[in-house]
Image (cartoon, rainbow, N blue to C red):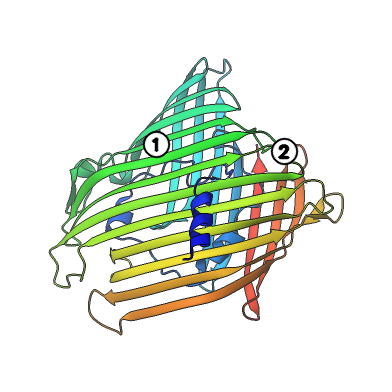
């Protein structure tokens, strides 16, 4: 990377982006399947271009607001990228007690996951204390979550949580398995400034999930695994600067794991490390015709070691990607509008893998490609009062003449 690119990337890492309820502003507790099994799929050179182009176009409700927000896009012939979040809160007549449900179906670098949180909270002035759980039919897989929320108004929020993953695992599991170190994850989320649906104004938001070292022994799998993880996000929004409205965001993750094996096909590596950061910078011209928007996205990801039982490989994956994108918004009728956009940039990827059983040829791929994509999202306002929008988004690849995957999005605040 040249000096100018290093300087540019360094400046970007000081600047975050406005984002709402998503996998970063919700707790990301330790998952046993992530620790033992890892990701269910390999990435290819187009994986993150697809995920960028399928991102939700509507600004989601804040993580403390009720609503449904989801996007589903075809990223490969046998793969659907899903990112869905649903929250509904019910209050008693006096407003002091609440029951709430949060449903999340998404993916992270450890693979696809589901969380279905059911909780009960009690309000004391500007504070809410609550207990919640990701309740499962298999009691051994139930997570318990304790939360404290401070929210004097919609512009200020502080939320902390302690999550006990697999809280009853050692007592309830039918497997020949146990935790030697009790798993726990800590979550903190703050917001200052901004407004509920992104009206102009300064805003700062941070989120952090920390899972300290935990150890699980699964004798059925012949595996002794330990690991820790830190995930952090910081974002900033700014009022309109002249005619431009900027949005900036930074995300990062550090994951470390070690393994001991009591199986015949012992993997080549007994560790796993992931280091990742991404930056997205956007701006919208609020006064120009068709309100053009543009931005940059930068991703750096490095993984090495044993990738878990799902892939059953050891090796490394290293990628660096930078994409620019530009789009417009055009009204087509009273409720219809469309927001075509072009994405173009460069992706560098190295993949080296050796299977646990030694069968098949080792994977050794290196790609340096220019990639491009066109989005043609047609959007329909379902409910003007809440801003509910349905989006149908066909896409086309530019680097080769091919369909780029269909995408459907639904955004419906309650």
Report the residue at 30% width, 81% height from top. 362
**Is residue 370 among what the camera can see?**
yes
Quadrant containing the C terminus in the rendered view: top right
Which residue of the protein is positioned furthest toward the front in this rendering? 3
Distance between the alpha carbons at the discs numbered 2 and 1: 30 Å
Q: Which mark is residue 116?
A: none
Q: Taking 361 as reference, is 108 left or right?
A: right
* Dot placed on the residue nearer the N-terminal end, 2 or 1: 1
Badge count:
2
User: What residue sits right under mark 2 in the picture?
Assistant: 386
User: What residue sits right under mark 1 in the picture?
Assistant: 187
Position of residue 122 measured from the top left corner of the image (x, y, whole percent): 46, 20
Position of residue 354 measured from the top left corner of the image (x, y, whole percent): 28, 76
Density class for disc 2 (Cα within 10 Å; few <14, some 14-19, many ≥20) is few
Residue toward you, 410 or 234: 234
Which residue of the protein is positioned furthest toward the right in this rendering? 333
Report the residue at 51% width, 67% height from top. 47
Residue toward you, 353 or 243: 243
**Is residue 306 among what the camera can see?**
no
The quarter of the displayed image where residue 245 is located: top right
Q: Secondary structure at mark 2?
A: loop
Q: Is residue 65 above or below residue 275?
A: above
Q: Secondary structure at mark 1?
A: strand
Q: Taking 317 as reference, is 336 left or right?
A: right
**Residues at circles 2 and 1 in contact by the CB criterion of under 8 Å:** no
Q: Is residue 357 above or below residue 182?
A: below
Position of residue 410 measured from the top left corner of the image (x, y, whole percent): 65, 51
Q: Taking 287 as reference, is 10 left or right?
A: left
| Tag in front: 2 or 1 | 1
Position of residue 282 measured from the top left corner of the image (x, y, whole percent): 64, 51
Report the residue at 71% width, 41% height from top. 241
């Amino acid at each position: 990377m040249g000096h100018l690119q290093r300087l540019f990337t360094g400046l970007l890492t000081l600047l975050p982006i406005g984002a709402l309820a998503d996998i970063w502003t919700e707790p990301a507790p330790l998952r046993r399947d992530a620790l033992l099994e890892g990701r269910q799929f390999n990435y290819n050179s187009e994986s993150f271009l697809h995920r960028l182009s399928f991102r939700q176009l509507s600004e989601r409700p804040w993580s403390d607001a009720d609503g449904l927000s989801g996007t589903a896009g075809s990223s490969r012939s046998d793969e659907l990228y899903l990112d869905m979040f649903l929250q509904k809160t019910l209050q008693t007549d006096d407003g002091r007690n609440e029951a709430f449900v949060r449903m999340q179906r998404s993916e992270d670098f450890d693979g696809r996951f589901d969380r279905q949180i059911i909780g009960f909270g009690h309000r004391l002035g500007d504070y809410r204390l609550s207990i919640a759980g990701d309740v499962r039919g298999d009691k051994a897989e139930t997570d318990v979550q304790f939360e404290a929320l401070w929210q004097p108004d919609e512009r200020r929020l502080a939320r902390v949580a302690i999550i006990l993953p697999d809280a009853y695992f050692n007592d309830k599991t039918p497997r020949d398995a146990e935790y030697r170190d009790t798993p726990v994850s800590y979550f903190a989320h703050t917001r200052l400034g901004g407004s509920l649906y992104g009206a102009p104004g300064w805003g700062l938001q941070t989120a952090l999930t920390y899972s300290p070292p935990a150890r699980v022994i699964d004798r059925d799998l012949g595996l002794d695994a330990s690991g820790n993880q830190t995930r952090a996000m910081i974002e900033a929004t700014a009022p309109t600067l002249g005619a431009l409205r900027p949005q900036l965001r930074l995300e990062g993750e550090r994951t470390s794991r070690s393994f001991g094996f009591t199986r015949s096909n012992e993997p080549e590596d007994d560790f796993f490390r992931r280091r990742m950061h991404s930056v997205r910078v956007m701006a919208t011209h609020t006064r120009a015709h068709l309100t053009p928007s543009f931005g940059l996205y930068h991703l750096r990801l490095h993984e090495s070691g044993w990738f878990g039982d799902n892939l059953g490989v050891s090796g490394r994956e290293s990628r660096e990607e930078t994409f620019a994108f530009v789009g417009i918004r055009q009204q087509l009728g009273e409720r219809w509008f469309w927001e075509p956009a072009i994405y173009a940039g460069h992706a560098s990827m190295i993949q080296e893998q050796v299977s646990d059983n030694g069968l098949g040829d080792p994977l050794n791929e290196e790609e340096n490609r220019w990639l491009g994509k066109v989005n043609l999202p047609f959007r329909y306002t379902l409910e003007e009062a809440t801003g509910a929008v349905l989006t149908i988004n066909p896409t086309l690849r530019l680097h080769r003449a091919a369909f780029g995957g269909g995408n459907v999005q639904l955004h419906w605040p309650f």
